[in-house]
Image (cartoon, rainbow, N blue to C red):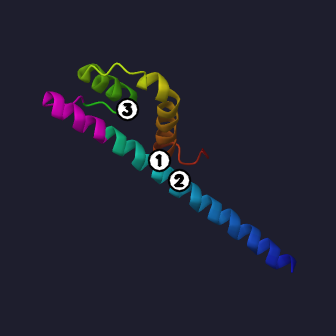
Amino acid sequence: MTEHLRRNALDFIEEAENDIKILNLAVFHLEQALQLSLKYVLFNLTGSFPKIHDVKELLARVINLTGNKTDMMNKYSIHLDLLVEAYISSRYLSHIIL
């Protein structure tokens, strides 16, 4: 019985580690999708896009070009910061748990 409990505990730890890897990959893909979407919009508006990766800067440029002076940057600033932080962690610091 104790061996069964120990094995189950170890299995759940292993599954949790796999879940974190999947989460990291999902966040990485989400950030990439947002980055490319913003570059797509910029390209359609200007015929080019900057060779940068900062989604907040890309979004600011889209907002600037469209004249859409909504409070979007302030409203979603924390979300974007978390996305960027999670992206960096998943890409470069995969050993750190988010």
Residue 46, quarter of picture = top left
The image quadrant of residue 39 is: top left
- What crowding class fits label 3: few (fewer than 14 Cα within 10 Å), some (14-19), or many (20 or more)? many
Q: Residue at x 51, y 57 (%)?
A: 22
Amino acid bearing label 1 = Val
Q: The N terminus lies in which quarter of the figure?
A: bottom right
The residue pinned by badge 2 equals: 23
Looking at the image, residue 56 sits to the left or right of residue 92; the answer is left
Task: Report x, y in % for residue 96.
Answer: 60, 45
Looking at the rendering, the stretch of residues picked out in magenta corresponds to: 36-50
Q: Quadrant of the C terminus?
A: top right
Q: Amino acid at mark 2?
A: Leu
The residue at which mark 3 appears reads as 55
Q: Quote the CA–CA distance across marks 3 and 2.
A: 19 Å
Give the residue drawn at x 47%, y 39%.
Answer: 88
Assess whether residue 45 is covered by the magenta stretch.
Answer: yes
Residue shown at 49% from the left, 46% from the top: 90
- Residue topped by disc 1: 27
**Of callouts 3 and 1, which one flags the residue occurring earlier in the amino acid sequence?**
1
- Up-down relation of residue 16 to residue 62 (above or below): below
| Pointers 2 and 1 in contact (C-beta within 8 Å) | yes
SS state under label 3: helix
Q: Residues within 10 Å of mark 2 (few under 14, many from 20)?
A: some
Alpha-carbon neighbours of circle 1 within 10 Å: few (<14), some, or many (≥20)?
many
Most prominent secondary structure in the magenta stretch? helix
Amino acid on which the number 3 mark rests in the picture:
Val
What secondary structure is marked by label 2?
helix
Residue 71 or 2: which is nearer the viewer?
71
How many numbered discs sit on the rendered protein? 3
Gap between marks 2 and 1 measured at Cα: 6 Å
